[in-house]
């Protein structure tokens, strides 16, 4: 009888330790946060509504953007890293309002760029201008895909953070 009690205690201890290990890993992923700002390229404005930024780390290019973003992480429903030719891309699915804004701005600004800023942690140094995809057509489906100027590891931190923020925002919208 004593043998069974010891075996039971060992099994119980192992289950408890496995539960702690799994619980810690899950809570860390759920705590990750991310930010995403989509700006539109504009002509320089002396009134102060535009901002000059430097894009791309390897071969910097100056772009003038509208100071206020047209879309943020508050408009995101889902983000994911996808495999693309020669590497990877980030695909962002926007909510109803975000889809409407994306369609309006893409239809009204062909030949200009969406300029995307991303931040993959609460540290300011973990954020930068990621991409400036050219607007070639009207985007009506609410999905924006772009090849970011970041490592795969940074993208793998950004996307779960964006999804966590999106879940929190849309959960509070339902209440």
Image (cartoon, rainbow, N blue to C red):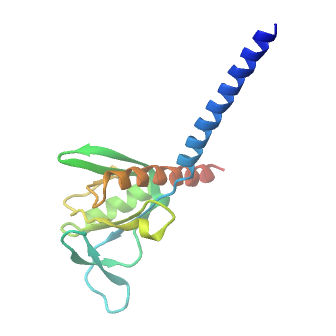
Q: Residue lying furthest right in this view?
A: 1
Q: Residue lying furthest top in this view?
A: 1
Residue 129 point in image, percent of width and height? 33, 68
Q: Is residue 158 above or below residue 84?
A: below
Question: At 60% across and 37% down in the image, what residue appears?
Answer: 21
Q: Is residue 64 above or below residue 125?
A: below
Residue 54 point in image, percent of width and height? 27, 76
Q: Is residue 2 above or below residue 151?
A: above
Residue 5 point in image, percent of width and height? 79, 14
Question: At 26% across and 66% down in the image, what residue appears?
Answer: 132
Given residues 39 and 138, the one toward you in this image is: 39
The image quarter in which residue 97 lies: bottom left
The image quarter in which residue 37 lies: bottom left
Residue 119 point in image, percent of width and height? 43, 63
Q: Give the quarter of the figure containing the N terminus.
A: top right
Is residue 67 shown left or right of residue 169?
left
Given residues 137 and 71, the one toward you in this image is: 71
Question: At 36% across and 91% down in the image, what residue appears?
Answer: 47
Question: At 26% across and 43% down in the image, what residue appears?
Answer: 83
């Amino acid at each position: 009888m004593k043998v069974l009690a010891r075996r039971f205690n060992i099994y119980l201890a192992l289950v408890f330790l496995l539960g702690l290990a799994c619980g810690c890993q899950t809570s860390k992923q759920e705590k990750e946060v991310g930010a995403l700002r989509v700006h539109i390229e504009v002509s320089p404005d002396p009134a102060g509504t535009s901002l000059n930024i430097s894009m791309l780390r390897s071969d910097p290019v100056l772009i003038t953007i509208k100071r206020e973003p047209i879309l943020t992480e508050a408009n995101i429903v889902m983000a994911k890293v996808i495999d693309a030719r020669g590497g990877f891309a980030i695909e962002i699915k926007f909510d109803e309002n975000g889809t409407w804004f994306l369609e309006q701005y893409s239809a009204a600004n062909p030949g200009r760029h969406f300029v995307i800023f991303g931040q993959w942690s609460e540290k300011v140094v973990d954020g930068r201008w990621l991409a400036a995809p050219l607007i070639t057509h009207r985007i009506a489906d609410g999905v924006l895909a772009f090849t970011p100027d970041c490592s795969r590891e940074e993208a793998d931190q950004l996307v779960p953070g964006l999804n966590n923020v999106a879940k929190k925002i849309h959960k509070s919208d339902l209440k």
